[in-house]
Image (cartoon, helix red, strand yellow):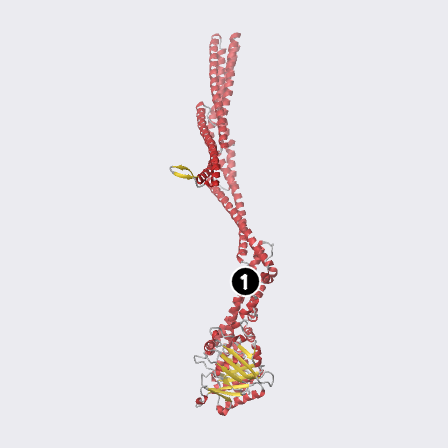
Amino acid sequence: MNEEAHGEEVRGSAAMPAAEVERLLALLATTGEVHPDLEKVLREPQAGRIVEEIMSDEIQDPGA
Amino acid sequence: MRFKIQAPEASHGIRVIEEIPDLALCRVEGINGVGKTLALHLLEICSGGQPYATRPHAWASLCKYLGPVEITIDGLRVEREDGDHTLRFAFDWRARADAEVPREITTELFEDVSLDGGSLADMHEVRKLLSVVRIAGDQSLTDTIAGIVAYDVELLKSAAALAAARSEVADRRAEELLAPFPEAPARRALEVAEERRALESARRELEAQRAESSDRLRALEAAERAAVAAEEINTNAGALKEEIAGLQERAAEARGRTEEAERALEEAREKERLSSAAAKTLGRAESLVTRRLRDLGKLEGNVRDLAEELEILAEEPAVAAALEHLSSRRAEVAAERADANDAFALRDLLDGLMAALSTTAQTGLRGRVVARIAGEPITAGALLDAVQERRGRLSAEMPMIEELDRELAELGEVEKKLDELSNLLGKAEEKRASLSEAEAALEKLAGEAAKGGSTAERAAKRAAAQRAEIEIGAALGLAQRQLAQLGGGASSADLKAELERYLGEAGTTRAELAGKLGETRRASVEARDKLEAMRFEEETLETEATALGRELETQTQALAIEDAHARLREILGERAPQVGGDLEDMARAWLGAHAAGDRAVTRVQQTRSRLLALERDIEALLEAISNNSTPGAELDSVRKLYQERMLAQFDQPELLAALFDGGRLTRIDLDTNEIVWSTAAGEPRVRPFEAFSSGERAFAYVQAQLATLSENPAANKVVAIDEFGAFLSADRLLRLRAAVRRRLDEGAVDQAIVVLPLLAGDAESTGDKGYLAGEFDVVAAG
């Protein structure tokens, strides 16, 4: 599956409008639940890239 | 703007009003169920809103039974003062009945979205053109608060669903990246390396133990030999010593007698003057006896030496028995040698048969019968196979000719020595006979001489004494040699000292020696077997390590050069496995890549867990609010969060003026379900949520919502005020109309639609449509 296909995967019924994402992140910020991974998952339109970025982090700094 | 809605196949009680006229302040009155609110919801969706976000069941039902729909909106303004454009929407959502409620309204939800016949590809363009906001008045204050919280619950559920979907994609992506490089070889390579190190360590330890055990075994075996030798001395030395002592005594006596005889002979010679002839004769006789005695002594010495070499007694019967045994053995060996000759002949015969039959088989006669044995046909192929099989067994069975020849030669040597011993024994017998003859002659001469004197007699006595002395000396020498050979030549004291020294080296005692020796020998054998097994296992592991190394090297080369793995190379960076690197480093690098992939997938999965945990807490708070109960202490953090948010939400001038005496809100308490505020005069007030009347809240709520509309950037802003009629008295309705009119005049709203229930008695005037639409006139409405 290529990057474009990953992008398609997360659009459609599961996608959230940007305003709702911001509202959710604000809610999570007030509850202390905001996490870089969560922000990536909510903001990054290409799910494949999310895991690639986190994997790269893990390679450079395992278990950080 | 005029709104036309066509839903010709709506079923199962779903209805929607067909038209809302182009009136700036429009009133719609209709019977229950005619589809007033549904029309407003559809318009909200067409302008990009989602009124069903928290009502999935209502959405599913709508999709299932609404059927195909066409909505047209005329009189739209695109540029300022330009009001003659048309938006058209067409959709059929029946295929979406089982799908989730779409959080984001996109053009994909519609079959057609067009402006003046031109298709619009993006809802952003629609949102810039049109905004439809519905303000509902049928909610209690508790419902309003619960609605805000419920929206967040749905938001979190959607986010969790999104996280789940992205988690699945992340899982697949990680799998795509790493699947061409299976983890098992790398993991096994490290295991094998560890096993090899452990095995090598264990082997070295065992070898050290075995070396130590070998030293101990040598000491124990030396101790055992010393113990056995000492025991032999203890058993035999006493008897030999007694025998030697007796022989020495007898030798001394014999020597004394010889000396006595010599003296007597000398005396006789001196006393008697023998005639020269008699003296010469007697002298020759004496010389003869003496020479024969010497020859006999020498011959008997040779006999003893040869008998010792052959390890038999120096007796003719023993020689005869040994020769008989030798003859028997030689006959056996000779028979085996003859068999061997036959075996060679048989081998030559079989080789000839094989050569002949092989040629025959190659010419295609393999299946032809060449003989019959007991009536059974034998083919050339079967005979060739049988001959080849017999030839193979014969090679394994053929005796070792050289070994047989060597044994025959050895037997010949032994036979020669036995013959020589037999010959010596015969000669010794002859010597004894000739000596006896010489002695008899000397005795006779002596007897004759005695007539003439005693010299010859005394000479005979001396010869007898000398012979006795020689025999005793021979016996004494034999006994002394036997004693000297006891214990390997060492003395009893030396052997005891040696035994103690080796026992000390072996760390044991005489009593424990036998047990320790057996135990150490068994341990030595076990250690040897274990070492052998370890060497085999080491070879096996080395073979496996080599194969794994090749596999990992192939993987690493593929990663380094193939375009398909460019992204993985980029992700791994300098931590990527290196071609030509150390096997264990390569394996660790691959495992590191897989572990990073696993952790990355887990981290993406965990985002969903975080969202669901918060969603559970907020949902629990929502349930407490809806049931008017006290939330648990575990919900304090989210309760306080929403108290703050409610306070901000309600802190609007219209609401403060309408509901809170124009004062200042202090606290909205979701624990006690109360609102605390202070009046403009600073007096504190507390009121439970349920104590606010519907009319008060509805009026205040619509005022507050209207106040927010001016911020909307759409070119055409429509506000629909729904479900308020039942709560508003005529005077408040007038004030509401005035407030709406003011917003229209201010340009904050372009069109207002007030939806009211149909007054009693007006049902007939609606005709088949079931609703009326016209200018919002409070008198008419009231």
Front residue of B440 and B725: B725
Query: Is residue B586 depicted above or below B474 in this figure?
Result: below
Q: For residue B266, say whether it is visible.
A: yes
Q: Which residue is mark 1?
A: B176
Query: Is residue B184 depicted above or below B782 in this figure?
Result: above
In the rendering, at what x and y percent does residue B406 appear?
50, 30
Specify few, some or many for label 1: CA neighbours under 10 Å numbering under 14, 14-19, or 20 or more: some
For badge 1, the amino acid type reads Glu
Front residue of B291 and B673: B673
Which residue occupies 43% across, 80% down? B13
In the rendering, at what x and y percent does residue B611 appear?
52, 71
Q: For residue B201, say whether it is visible.
A: no
Quadrant of the rendered structure where residue A60 is? bottom right
Q: Secondary structure under badge 1?
A: helix
Furthest residue to the bottom?
B779
Front residue of B451 and B249: B451
Furthest residue to the left?
B375
In the rendering, at what x and y percent does residue B311 appear?
48, 28
